[in-house]
Image: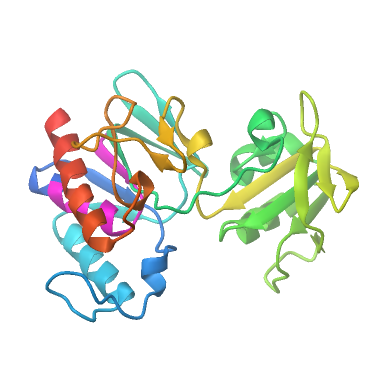
């Protein structure tokens, strides 16, 4: 079991990892460089490093964290499950256990489709390799809003009767995948997902798989208190859930790298001291 799992591979996440490793705690940073910093050509206001690019700054932080012994892996955490003295993190088909968690998920929070939260686990899934076998020989929809969608759609095409892919066409898609141009507006169903509402039309499906770059806070961790779109924290970066901390853009304004790094440092130290 890990001492600390950090969700988010940005400046807050790497800062938390560096601080925790300085306290000799085992650390895993989970995430991909999908935020605005990874695309910024110039960061003009980071103290001591004028005019550095976002990718260069992220690479330096990542390399420092790895050099200190932090583990890193790409992916999206679908859910954090309290397990008494630890937490289970659902990462695709994998499962990671950690004593404490630091949320550094950034400011971007996806908006759930109507019906998505209510039908999660009842015909709505975030993992094709986890739940796909439940839909062998059936009709499923894939809503593609993240990099995992293509691989997962191809897997589902190998076991499902029909896979409708709501996303951009890609030559790497399995020929059996039906690329659709409609935009999903809602997930239909009362006790179980029965289809999608698209352009006023009801399209029947037995299951709906959704793949995004990030998870909505409302579905990531039960009991997590928020203020609007941001996670509520105190000065030690503690959230409303014991042994869960948060840092960076996900905690609110200002959305600045220096602020994220500072909060990440505090969150990493707090998490390490709690062990």
Residue 153 sits above or below residue 60 on the image? above
> At x 77% / y 33%, what residue is drawn?
193
Quadrant where the C terminus is found in the figure: top left
Left or right? Give the position of 147 relative to 70: right
Q: How is the image coloured?
A: rainbow
**Spot occupied by residue 219 in the image (x, y as percentages of width and height):** 53, 35
Left or right? Give the position of 207 relative to 255: right
**Spot occupied by residue 131 in the image (x, y as percentages of width and height):** 64, 37
Residue 108 visible (yes or no): yes
> At x 34% / y 26%, what residue is drawn?
241
Q: Nearer the viewer, residue 70 or 193?
A: 193
Q: Nearer the viewer, residue 42 or 38?
A: 42
> At x 16% / y 53%, what residue is drawn?
18
Quadrant where the N terminus is found in the figure: top left
Q: Nearer the viewer, residue 248 or 210?
A: 248
Left or right? Give the position of 202 relative to 69: right
List the single residue furthest toward the left. 23
Q: Is residue 157 magenta?
A: no
**Spot occupied by residue 24 in the image (x, y as percentages of width and height):** 10, 43
Q: How many marks?
A: 0
**Spot occupied by residue 108 in the image (x, y as percentages of width and height):** 47, 54
List the single residue furthest toward the top. 84
Residue 161 visible (yes or no): no
List the single residue furthest toward the right. 201
Residue extent of the magenta highlight: 1-19
Residue 103 occupies which quadrant of the picture?
Answer: top left
Q: Is residue 16 magenta?
A: yes
Left or right? Give the position of 244 relative to 214: left
> At x 34% / y 48%, what residue is drawn?
104
């Amino acid at each position: 079991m890990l001492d600390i799992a950090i969700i988010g591979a940005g400046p807050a996440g790497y800062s938390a990892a560096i601080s925790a490793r300085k306290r000799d705690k085992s650390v895993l940073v989970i995430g991909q460089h999908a935020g605005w910093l990874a695309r910024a050509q110039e960061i003009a206001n980071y103290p001591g490093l004028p005019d550095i690019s976002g990718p260069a700054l992220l690479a330096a932080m990542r390399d420092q964290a790895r050099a200190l012994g932090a583990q890193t892996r790409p992916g999206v955490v679908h859910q954090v499950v309290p397990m008494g003295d630890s937490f289970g993190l659902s990462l695709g088909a994998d499962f990671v256990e950690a004593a404490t968690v630091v949320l550094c998920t950034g400011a971007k929070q996806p908006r759930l489709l109507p019906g998505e939260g209510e039908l999660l686990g009842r015909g709505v899934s975030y993992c094709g390799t986890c739940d796909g076998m439940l839909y062998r020989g059936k009709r499923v929809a894939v809503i593609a809003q993240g990099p995992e969608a293509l691989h997962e759609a191809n897997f589902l095409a190998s076991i499902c009767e029909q896979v409708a892919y709501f996303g951009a066409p890609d030559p790497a898609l399995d020929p059996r995948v039906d690329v659709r141009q409609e935009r999903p507006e809602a997930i239909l169903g009362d006790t179980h997902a029965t289809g999608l509402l698209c352009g006023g039309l009801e399209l029947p499906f037995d299951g709906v798989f959704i793949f995004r770059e990030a998870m909505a806070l409302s579905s990531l961790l039960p009991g997590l208190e928020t203020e609007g779109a941001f996670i509520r924290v105190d000065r030690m970066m503690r959230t409303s859930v014991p042994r869960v901390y948060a840092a960076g853009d996900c905690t609110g304004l200002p959305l600045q790298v220096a602020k994220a790094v500072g909060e990440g440092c505090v969150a990493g130290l707090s998490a390490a001291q709690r062990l």
